[in-house]
Amino acid sequence: MKNTTITLAHGNGGSESKELVESLFYSAFGNSILNNSEDAALIENGKLAFTTDSFTVSPLSFSGGDIGKLAICGTCNDLAMMGAKPKYLSIAFMIEEGFSFDELKNIIKSMRDELEKNDVIVVCGDTKVVPKGNVDKLFINTTGIGEVYYNGISASHLKEGMSILVSRDIGSHGAVIFAAREGMALSSELKSDCASLYPQVKSLVDASISIVAMRDATRGGLAAVLNEWASSSGVTIEINEASIPICEEVQGICELLGFEATALANEGTYVIAVPVEEAEKTLEILRQTNQSAAIIGTVNNSYKGKVVLRSSWGTQRFLELPTGELLPRIC
Amino acid sequence: MSIELKDLYDDFRDAKVIKAYAKQIAIDAKELNRPIGIMEVCGGHTHTIMKYGLPQLMPANIHFVHGPGCPVCIMPKERIDHAYTLAMQENVILITLGDMIKVPGSNGSLQDARAKGADVRFVYSPMDVLEIAKMNPTKKVIFFAIGFETTTPMTAALLESVITQKIDNVLFYINHVTVPEVMTVLMADEENRPVENKIDAFLGPSHVSVIAGSDIYEPFASVYKRPVVVSGFEPVDVMQSIHMILRQMIEGRSEVEIQYSRAVDKKGNGKAQALIRTYFEKAPFFSWRGLGKVANSSWKLKEEFSSYDAEKIYKDILPTKECQDHKLCRCGDILKGLATPPECTIFGTLCKPNNPIGSCMVSSEGACAAYYRYGNMK
C-alpha cells in the first residue's frame, strides 16, 4: 500500500516530504551541492547562493500578506538564510483561465513592494495560462541568485554549548492560513508573519555575530528546523518549552484544533544558532525588530540527533518531526 | 467581564502547582501497601499524560494503565473497509472527523481513497455537513459518524437539522460507542490480568460525563470497589485526580468523585441525552478492535430513520469479510491495558505515524502515537 500514490502528507515538510525527496529526487539528481540540502545551494566556490521555490496558497490573500508577497519573501529569505544578499530573481506565473485581472494586479503590487525591501531585481520570467480546473487560480515560482557576504552557515555545524534563538513568536502564518481556509470566525488581530528577512540578517552580520546555523522555519515549523539541525549535526538540541514565544491567538487556535505551534508554518520567522557567549547580544539585535525574540535552548550531546523539550515542572519529552497532514483531533 | 481563551488553560499548566502535587503524591504514596495501576480510560487523558511527561512525576509504586477510550483506535478494520467502499462510490462525498481518514483498512485508508480520486473530507463540526450537502445537491453526502458519548449528540443534532431543513442528500454511517459497557468488560476480565496490569482505579473520561453525567461510573465504585475520579484534561487536573484517587485508596474508600467540576455534574446534559434518545437506540453489540463484540455498547439509528442509514441503504455493496489485524500488531492488548506500546515488536520500527500498522499509532489520542511522539523518557 505504501507509496503507490503521492499523498498530501508528502508535501507537509515533515518526515514524508523528507522520505520523498531523499528516496526519489536525491537518488536521481544527487550531487555534492544538492546533497548539502541547505535552504539555498552555494555555487561558484561559495560565492553565489541559488534557490527556487513554488508558491500555492489558499486563500490567495490572507491577513498579513498574499501569494505575491509570499513568493518574493520565500525565495529571498532562502538566500538570506545562507548569508547571501538577494540580487536577481526570475518569476514564473501559472494562471488559471478566468482569473481576475484586478486580483492579479494587486498581487503584482505586493510583489513590487517586497522586491524593494530586498533591493532585488527581476531579470527573467515566464507566463502560462492554463484551462479552467488545471491549476487552482494561480501558482507562482520564483528562483533567486544572491551574493554570499557571510560564509560558513550550515545545518551541520552545531556543537555542544551553543545557544538556539528564535527571531519572534512562532506559528502565525500557519494559524492564519488554517483559520482562513476552514472559515473559522476568529475575532482576532492575528497576522501572518510573512516578511523579508534580509534586512534583519544584515544587522546581525553588521554587528559581527558569529552565525553558526540559520534557517527560516517554513513548512514543518520550528520542530522541523530543530530536528534537521539535530540530525545533520549529530547533536541534541534541548529546548526550554516555556521560553518558546507563542502569541495568545496562535496558542488559542492550537488549543481549539489540537495542533502544536511548533509544527505550524512560518514565513518570516527564523531560528539561529550562535556561540553561547554571543547569545545575549544576538537577542538584543533580534529584539530591535521583534520584542518577542527569545533564547529557547542549547546544544548538548545527551540524545544525539534528537530534540528534547524540557517542561518547567521538570519533565522532558522528544519534539518529533511533524508527520502527516495536520488534522484536528476529535474530542 | 470577558473570558480569554487562555484563562481556560493557563492555571491548569502552572509549574508550581504541578510540582506541589508531585511532591504530595510522592509523600502519600508511601502509605500504599502495594503498587497500584490507574487506568486512564480516555485517549485524551493518555495524550495529556504523555505530552506533559506525567509518568516521570510518579513514584515507583504508581503507574498508568492505558485504556480503550480512543474512538479512532477502537474502530475495527471491517468498518474502515465499509467507509472506504462508500467513499469509492460514484457521486458520494464521505465526511468524517480528523484522524479517522488516516486509519488503514484492508485496502488502505480514507486518505488513500482520496488520493485515488474519492471525495473524502473532514470537518470540525458535524454541522458543517449541512453546508457541504447544500452545495452539492446532486451528490450523496455520507457522514461517517464516530466517537463516544461526547460526539453522539452532535450527530443527532445534525440529523435533526437534516430532517427539519428537508435536506435529502445526507446519509449517516453510525459508529457511536459508549464507555461504561467496555469498562465492564475490562472489570469482568480483571481476575485474569497479570499483576503488573491490574486496574486498581479509574481516571474517568470527563467529556463523556459532560454529556452523560458522572453517575454512569457508579457501578465501578459500588460493585467493583474501584475509586473513580472524573478528571479534566490539563496536567494540573490529572495530577489532582491522581492525588484524589490515592487518598481514596489509602482511606479504603471507593467512590465516584468529580475533579472536573467546572464542566461535569452527576446527571450530565439532559437535553443532549434526550436528543440522542430521539434518534438513536442501542445496537445489540459493536465489534471493538481488540476487545471483540461488546453487547449494548453502541448506538444505531432508530428504525423510523432508516432512510438516512447508509449502512442499510448500501447493505448490498458493503464487504462482509472479517479482517485480521497484522499478526505482530498488539493494538488489541494495548487497548485493553495489557501491554504498553514499547512491548509491541513493531512499535517504532515497522509501525510509525507515517506508516501506521495498527490504529493506536494513528490518532493523537492513541497510546502508540503518544509514546512515539513524546517518547517515554525517564
Image: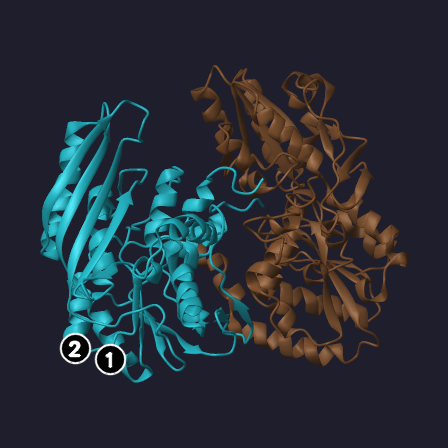
Chain colours: A cyan, B brown
Q: Nearer the viewer, residue A165 or A119?
A: A119
In the picture shown, does residue B377 fall above or below B257?
below
| Amino acid at circle 2 | Ala
**x and y percentages locating residue A63 in the rendered image:** 27, 45
**x and y percentages locating residue B2 in the rendered image:** 41, 52
Residue at 56 percent of width and 28 percent of height: B158
The residue at which mark 2 appears reads as: A207
| Amino acid at circle 1 | Lys
Q: CA distance from mark 1 to mark 2?
A: 9 Å
Residue at 38 percent of width and 40 percent of height: A185
Asked if residue B275 can be seen in this view, the reply is: no
Q: Quadrant of the N terminus of chain A?
A: top right
Dot 1, crowdedness within 10 Å: few (<14), some or many (≥20)? some
> What is the tally of numbered marks visible in this picture?
2
Identify the mark nearer the N-term, 1 or 2.
Answer: 2
Asked if residue B368 can be seen in this view, the reply is: yes
Would you say B46 lies left or right of B247 here?
A: left
